[in-house]
Image (cartoon, rainbow, N blue to C red):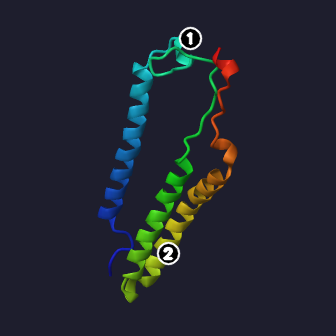
Amino acid sequence: MAPLIDFNAFITFLLALTIGIGTGIAGYIISRLITPLKYYDSKFERFECANPAVGKGRGWFMMQYYSYLIIFLTIEPIMIYCFVFFMVDRILFLNATQLFIIILLMIIPPLIFGLDASRRLELWRSGEVTSKEMT
């Protein structure tokens, strides 16, 4: 009788998870250690690619195609998993179905966010600079 849990696979999974999370935590700690904590006015000034700054900074600006990138990055894995799902043998069909449903549940929230962000047109406009602001 085979054991219910393959301990080698479980240890490999835990090791990969530990290394992944540990690398992220180590990167965060190192960035906090080497980043200067001093306040500089220039950090909050407008940057114009070496040109003199004109007018007031506009504040938060969303990238125009960010929402479409999110949509692409969620639809593409769904299509790939559909292709793999349809090639599964009948013996593994139940396991593949469960895995496919779990993957869909993980991918659907970012897809909904991307679709919602692409419909909100006010995020697309950065604001027009008038001739009055330039003087």
Do tag 2 and tag 1 residues touch (Cβ < 8 Å)? no
Q: Residue sitting at 37 percent across and 46 percent down?
A: 20
The foreground one among 129 and 26 is: 129
Q: Whole-Å distance between the Cαs marked 2 and 1?
A: 54 Å
Q: Quadrant of the N terminus?
A: bottom left
**How many numbered callouts?**
2
Q: Residue 11, how many percent across, how many down?
A: 33, 57
What amino acid is labelled 2 in the image? Answer: Gln
Foreground disc of the pair 2, 1: 1
Q: Residue furthest bottom?
A: 90
**Residue 124: which quarter of the image?**
top right
SS for tag 2? helix
What amino acid is labelled 1 in the image? Answer: Asp
Q: Residue sitting at 67 percent across and 47 percent down?
A: 121
Q: Is residue 93 left or right of residue 60?
A: left
SS for tag 1? helix
Q: Is residue 119 left or right of residue 47?
A: right
Q: Is residue 68 left or right of residue 8?
A: right
Q: Residue 27, how many percent across, how many down?
A: 39, 33
Work out whether residue 39 can be spotted: no
For disc 2, the marked residue is 98
For disc 1, the marked residue is 41
**Residue 119: which quarter of the image?**
bottom right
Label 2: few (<14), some (14–19) or many (≥20) C-alpha neighbours in 10 Å: few
- Sequence-first disc among 2 and 1: 1
